[in-house]
Image: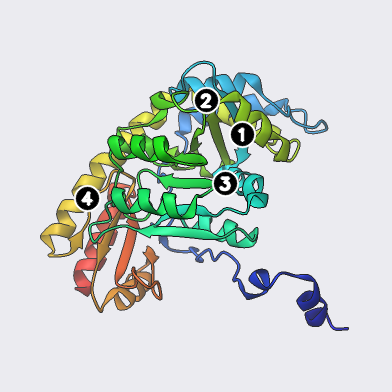
């Protein structure tokens, strides 16, 4: 039997028909496609950071439950006292754990569309049905439609990214409250971009027994560490933690994250600079006559009907990589640009203006 035939006999059809998650080659390009913080760790902090790593016990397994790091993250994220926390190798691992936990319920996952693609990708990989409610033309949530969808589908798990990716829009607090109150299963509010939004649902944790909050340090300037965390009622965290692989957060990530949290003001200042540049980018795009959405994240979504693919290619040829949604049933005419440094943003704007 050939490898192809053996794979066909062993793997689920959904796996065989799926494509691997694609990451664009950014070598030699100004990288504005992945919502990363464009600012590296300041040079004056690097020797201090390396000192914290110097005596790392690489010959030992890392702390499986680093309590001090949990406490530092809770303080940093303003997580109310008395709640549980678990860490993931990026928020992706935590999403995978959440979906795995409810996979045997016979009930679907529910989200909005468009949204963070990993919700659907991981649900498909795990064989769990994924349903979605379309955002309106301005990428706003239709609360009535979402509540009706929850009543119809009785989802085991609801994912809501707030701000939304790819639009950067926030869901009003009153809508989130209504959804959590009516939800028949777990509700996960994903605040990957909270450093740039100025708003958080964290203070509501503990108000409902089925509400969880998902965060990542990736957008704050630590994407290379791959560290996310899930906070919520201890009873839920205890159950979900059974699905976490042991020693999933390596010792270098643990120590680096702890060091970064001791210098949180540096990353807060970087976030403020990104928010200021976000506004400048929006104003320049608007002045160019481009339809661009306001954003509470570190990126902007804009549309160029009939020209998006051409503009994306032209920008890449000019050395600028942004996100294209070519082939997406709704976003094919849209592009998303991450907020970079002022120099990177100027390069993007100049290249775009030359192509328009």
- Which comes before the other along the chain, label 4 or label 1? 1
- Dot 2 corresponds to which residue? 73
Quadrant in the rendering for residue 58:
top right
Q: Which corner quadrant holds the C terminus? A: bottom left
Residue at left 46%, top 19%?
80
Along the viewing direction, whichever of 302 and 94 lies nearer the viewer: 94
Specify the label residue 87 is tagged with: 1
Tag 3 residue: 95
Quick one: label 2 or label 1, which is nearer the N terminus? 2
Measure the C-alpha gap from mark 4 to mark 1: 32 Å
For the residue carrying disc 1, how many other residues have a C-alpha within 10 Å: few (<14), some (14-19), or many (20+)?
many
Cβ–Cβ under 8 Å for marks 3 and 4: no
Picture coordinates of residue 167, whole percent (x, y): 31, 54
Q: Secondary structure at mark 2?
A: helix
Position of residue 303 measured from the top left corner of the image (x, y, whole percent): 25, 67
Residue corresponding to mark 4 = 294
Q: Is residue 318 left or right of residue 286?
A: right
In primary-sequence order, the first of circles 3 and 1 is: 1
Residue 329 in which image quadrant: bottom left
Which-is-in-front pick, marks 2 and 3? 3
């Amino acid at each position: 039997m050939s490898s192809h035939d053996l794979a066909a006999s062993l793997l689920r059809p959904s796996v065989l028909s799926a494509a691997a998650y694609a990451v664009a080659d950014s070598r030699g390009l100004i990288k504005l496609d992945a919502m990363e913080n464009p600012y590296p760790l300041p040079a004056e902090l690097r020797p201090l950071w390396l000192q914290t790593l110097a005596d790392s016990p690489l010959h030992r397994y890392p702390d499986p439950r680093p309590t001090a790091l949990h406490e530092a993250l809770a303080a940093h994220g303003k997580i109310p006292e008395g709640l549980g926390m678990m860490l993931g190798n990026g928020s992706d691992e935590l999403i995978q754990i959440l979906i795995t936990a409810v996979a045997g319920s016979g009930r679907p996952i529910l989200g909005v569309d468009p949204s963070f693609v990993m919700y659907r990708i991981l649900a498909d990989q795990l064989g769990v049905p994924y349903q979605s409610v379309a955002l309106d033309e301005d990428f706003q949530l239709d609360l009535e439609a979402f509540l009706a969808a929850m009543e119809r589908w009785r989802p085991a798990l609801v994912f809501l990214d707030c701000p939304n990716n790819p639009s950067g829009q926030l869901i009003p607090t009153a809508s989130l409250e209504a959804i959590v109150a009516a939800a028949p299963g777990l509700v996960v509010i994903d605040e990957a971009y909270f450093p740039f939004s100025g708003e958080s649902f964290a203070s509501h944790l503990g108000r409902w027994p089925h509400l969880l909050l998902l965060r990542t340090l990736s957008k704050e300037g630590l994407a290379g560490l791959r560290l996310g965390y899930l906070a919520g009622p201890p009873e839920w965290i205890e159950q979900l933690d059974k699905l976490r692989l042991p020693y999933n957060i390596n010792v270098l990530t643990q120590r680096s994250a702890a060091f970064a949290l001791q210098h949180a003001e540096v990353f807060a200042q970087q976030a403020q600079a990104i928010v200021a540049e976000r506004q400048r980018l929006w104003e320049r795009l608007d002045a160019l006559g481009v339809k661009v959405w306001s954003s509470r994240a570190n990126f902007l979504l804009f549309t160029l009907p009939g020209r998006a693919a051409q503009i994306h290619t032209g920008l890449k040829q000019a050395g600028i990589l942004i996100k294209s949604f070519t082939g997406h049933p709704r976003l094919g005419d849209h592009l998303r640009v991450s907020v970079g440094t002022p120099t990177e943003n100027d390069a993007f704007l100049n290249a775009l203006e030359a192509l328009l």
